[in-house]
Image (cartoon, grey):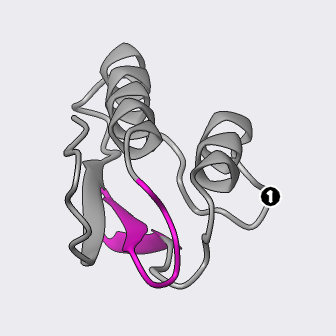
Amino acid sequence: MSFPGCNAQADIVFLVDSSGSVGRDNFARLLDFVNRVVDEMNIAYNHTRVGLVSFSNRAWISFTLDKYVKTTSFTHDMMHEEPNCKLRYRV
């Protein structure tokens, strides 16, 4: 998903279903998908900013658009579920 020569700025927010009906395995697949997509992006304050909202019976802001300035920071927190992150599978 690389776009050589593309210098467009973007704000991208992922909306992830964390309800019990998704199932634990599918939730893990969703997080893997988000990681793979973000890994291909140039995350920077003046380029592409990403955020993430999860929802079940209500919505939680997991990551705001201004939290990450590097792709590696975002993917690290997604893999290790940062303590302040509200991204959890809901049963």
Membership of 48 in magenta stretch: yes
Check disc 1 and give the amino acid type: Pro
**SS at badge 1:** loop
From the image, tell me which residue sits under label 1.
83
Inspect this view and state whether residue 57 appears: no
| Quadrant for the C terminus in the image | top left
Membership of 53 in magenta stretch: yes
Asked if 35 appears above or below 61 in the picture, the reply is: above
x 35%, y 21%: residue: 29
x 22%, y 55%: residue: 5
Asked if 23 appears above or below 49 in the picture, the reply is: above
Asked if 46 appears above or below 80 in the picture, the reply is: below
| Quadrant for the N terminus in the image | top left
Residue 32 x, y percent position in the rendering: 42, 26
**Residue nearest the observer in this picture, 19 or 78:** 78
Left or right: residue 70 compared with residue 12: right
Left or right: residue 29 compared with residue 3: right
Residue 20 x, y percent position in the rendering: 32, 35
Residue 70 x, y percent position in the rendering: 62, 60
Q: Quadrant of residue 14?
A: bottom left
x 38%, y 39%: residue: 40
**Residue nearest the observer in this picture, 24 or 33:** 33
**Residue nearest the observer in this picture, 79 or 38:** 38
Residue 59 x, y percent position in the rendering: 33, 72
Q: Residue furthest right?
A: 83
Inspect this view and state whether residue 36 appears: yes
Left or right: residue 36 compared with residue 1: right
Asked if 2 appears above or below 15 in the picture, the reply is: above
Categorize mark 1 by other alpha carbons within 10 Å: few (<14), some (14-19), many (20+): few
- Which region is colored magenta? 42-62
